């Protein structure tokens, strides 16, 4: 119990005791009045011991009733907590099912698209090698993104490769306005991470940070492990946190995915970059552990 709950409970018990004593005295007085006696004469006739025993019995009965009521209230509170926890768990399961349904709905038959892009690449190789290279990057990105949608978790190396393909396509469009640096220790390449999270942060950094900036900016991807946690960071020198219109929905969905898969031990941190821009950092628990372990 908290100090406030203890104080409230103590006051309740004091009221119960006082009511029991007053009730006993009132009952004795009423009985004496019916016999034409004063309460003092009634006490003298039945004796202090009998009167005290009667009052004690009334007090014990009242305390027992209050105790049973308190236990019943505690059971009701525990039941309410259990029902609330079950409702929250059901809501999380429903969100997971809806997220899975959205992923299934997003999966399209890719063969026609890839065959068409392959034909475009082949036609462009002779006369427009840069267009052919861009098409190849686009094909790699689309193939990797399809796999990322189908799998709940993928190796971090694959997610980094997906992000590189996307960034190469963006560099073909933005040119020198986009400068990219990627750091991934070989020891972390096989670590499995939730799919689509990294590419969501990279896309946000380009769309809401670097692309609106007239002179573009730098984008750095890096990952490291420390204290049993995996850190994945996307840092840009774009417009910064204050200028992210429309980015909130994507980041909100990302946080929901983290909560569903890892509970409170996974988080997304956002803070200002220096000299400008935004740093988005994913913090994931050690492999094989989650909030319920």
Image (spheres, rainbow, N blue to C red):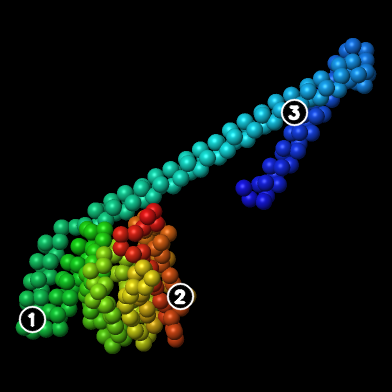
- SS at mark 2 in the image: strand
Asked if residue 20 lies left or right of residue 154, the reply is right
Name which quarter of the figure residue 159 lies in: bottom left
Q: Residue at x 42, y 77 (%)?
A: 278
User: Where's the C terminus, which quadrant?
Assistant: bottom left
Q: Nearer the viewer, mark 2 or mark 1?
A: 2
- Give the residue pinned by disc 2: 271
Task: State which tag comes first along the sequence, 2 or 1.
Answer: 1
x%, y% of residue 197? 32, 66
Task: State which tag comes first along the sequence, 1 or 3.
Answer: 3
- SS at mark 3 in the image: helix
Residue 212 seen: no
Name which quarter of the figure residue 64 lies in: top right
Determine the CA span between mark 1 and mark 3. 98 Å
Q: Tell me, yes or no, whether the two marked residues, 2 and 3, touch with CB atoms within 8 Å.
A: no
Q: Nearer the viewer, mark 1 or mark 3?
A: 3
Determine the CA span between mark 2 and mark 3. 63 Å
* Picture layout, residue 213 above or below residue 254: below
* Picture layout, residue 196 above or below residue 33: below
- Give the residue pinned by disc 1: 125
Q: Residue at x 28, y 88 (%)?
A: 176
Residue 23 seen: yes
x%, y% of residue 258? 37, 60
- SS at mark 1 in the image: helix
x%, y% of residue 65? 66, 28
Tag 2: Cα neighbours inside 10 Å, few (<14), some, or many (≥20)? few
Label for residue 220? none
- Give the residue pinned by disc 3: 59
Task: State which tag comes first along the sequence, 2 or 3.
Answer: 3
Tag 3: Cα neighbours inside 10 Å, few (<14), some, or many (≥20)? many
Q: Residue at x 31, y 69 (%)?
A: 198
């Amino acid at each position: 119990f908290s100090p406030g709950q203890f104080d409230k409970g103590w006051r309740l018990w004091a009221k119960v005791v006082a009511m029991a004593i007053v009730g006993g005295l009132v009952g004795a007085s009423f009985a004496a009045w019916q016999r034409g006696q004063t309460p003092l004469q009634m006490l003298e006739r039945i004796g202090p011991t009998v009167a005290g025993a009667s009052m004690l019995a009334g007090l014990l009965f009242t305390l027992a009733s209050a105790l049973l009521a308190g236990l019943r209230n505690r059971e009701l509170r525990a039941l309410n907590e259990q029902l609330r926890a079950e409702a929250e768990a059901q809501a999380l399961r429903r969100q997971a099912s809806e997220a899975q349904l959205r992923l299934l709905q997003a999966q399209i038959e890719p063969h026609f698209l890839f065959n068409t892009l392959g034909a475009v690449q082949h036609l462009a190789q002779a006369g427009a090698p840069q267009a052919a290279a861009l098409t190849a990057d686009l094909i790699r990105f689309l193939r990797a993104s399809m796999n990322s949608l189908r799998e709940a978790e993928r190796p971090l190396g694959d997610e980094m490769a997906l992000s590189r393909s996307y960034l190469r396509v963006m560099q073909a469009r933005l040119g020198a306005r986009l400068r990219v640096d990627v750091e991934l220790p070989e020891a972390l390449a096989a670590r499995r991470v939730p799919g689509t999270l990294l590419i969501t942060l990279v896309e946000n950094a380009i769309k809401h940070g670097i692309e609106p900036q007239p002179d573009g900016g730098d984008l750095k991807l890096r990952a490291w492990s420390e204290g049993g946690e995996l850190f994945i960071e996307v840092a840009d020198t774009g417009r910064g946190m204050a200028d992210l219109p429309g980015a909130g929905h994507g980041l909100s969905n990302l946080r929901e995915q983290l909560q569903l898969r890892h509970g409170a031990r996974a988080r997304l941190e956002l803070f200002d970059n220096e000299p400008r821009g935004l740093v988005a950092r994913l913090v994931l628990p050690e492999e094989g552990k989650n909030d319920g372990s």
